[in-house]
Image: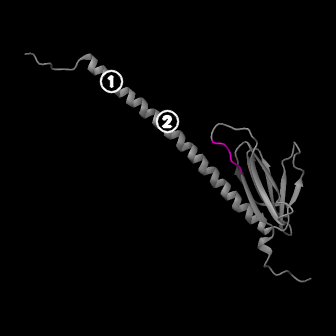
Amino acid sequence: MNRRRGYSLIEILVVIATGAAMMGVALGLLGMLIRLEQASRREVQEETVMNRLADQFRRDVHAADRLAVASAPGVADLPPVWQFPLEAGHVVEYRAEQGELVRIERRDDKVLKQESFSLPAEARVSIDPAGDALPGIVSLRIAGTGIRPPGPAWRGARVDAELAKDRRFVKQKQP
């Protein structure tokens, strides 16, 4: 009786094919997990930027007593500019530019602070009074243009704030 002391070529090929199939599935899953992680990171980053923008916008509107449009929206060469006068010579501007909203804080033509908030490329920005029903309310609206780039669809955002909220309980100086 002869005993076999090795594996046949077919047995070795079956083991190699099974291992290759398992490696292919593992690499496919790994690639999918990496793409999901990148998309999640991008969404968290956009959410963080939107939360920072909403907080800063509310603080600016609460400190201001009115909204002024410095340039006409829709002019091809100039981006829209919205200004919130805070006190004598102190103004906060918001400018909608390509893919970002820029906040500039000025005092007497000197820039005190400038920061940019990244927006999705297809986002449209508008800052308007909320309407006659809600006097003193200003809305920041960020909406998509309908052009959808690859990736998750942009849902848009709306931030409402009350003008001069921080000034309600401040004693006014008597002339």
Residue 114 in view of the camera: no
Tell me: 154 left or right of 72. left
Q: Which mark is residue 104?
A: none
| Secondary structure beneath label 2 | helix
Residue at 65 percent of width and 36 percent of height: 150
Q: How far apart are marks 2 and 1 (CA)?
A: 22 Å
Magenta segment main secondary structure = loop
Q: Which callout, 2 or 1, points at the residue further toward the start of the chain?
A: 1
Tell me if residue 46 comes above or below residue 85 in the rendering.
above
Where, quadrant-wise, is the C terminus in this rendering?
bottom right
Residue 66 in view of the camera: yes
Specify the amino acid type for callout 1: Ile
Residue at 28 percent of width and 21 percent of height: 12
Name the residue carrying label 2: 31
Q: Where is residue 101 in the image (x, y as percent from the top left)?
A: 75, 51
Tell me if residue 167 comes above or below residue 146 in the rendering.
below
Q: In which quarter of the image is residue 5?
A: top left
The foreground one among 15 and 105 is 15
Q: Position of residue 158 (x, y in %)?
A: 73, 55
Tell me: 76 left or right of 155. right
Q: Position of residue 73 (x, y in %)?
A: 87, 49
Tell me: 147 left or right of 78. left
Q: Give the range drawn in magenta.
A: 152-156
Specify the amino acid type for callout 2: Gly
Q: Which mark is residue 16?
A: 1
Q: Mark 2: give few (<14), some (14-19) or many (20+) Cα within 10 Å.
A: few
Residue at 67 percent of width and 58 percent of height: 52
Tell me if residue 136 comes above or below residue 128 in the rendering.
below
Residue at 11 percent of width and 19 percent of height: 3
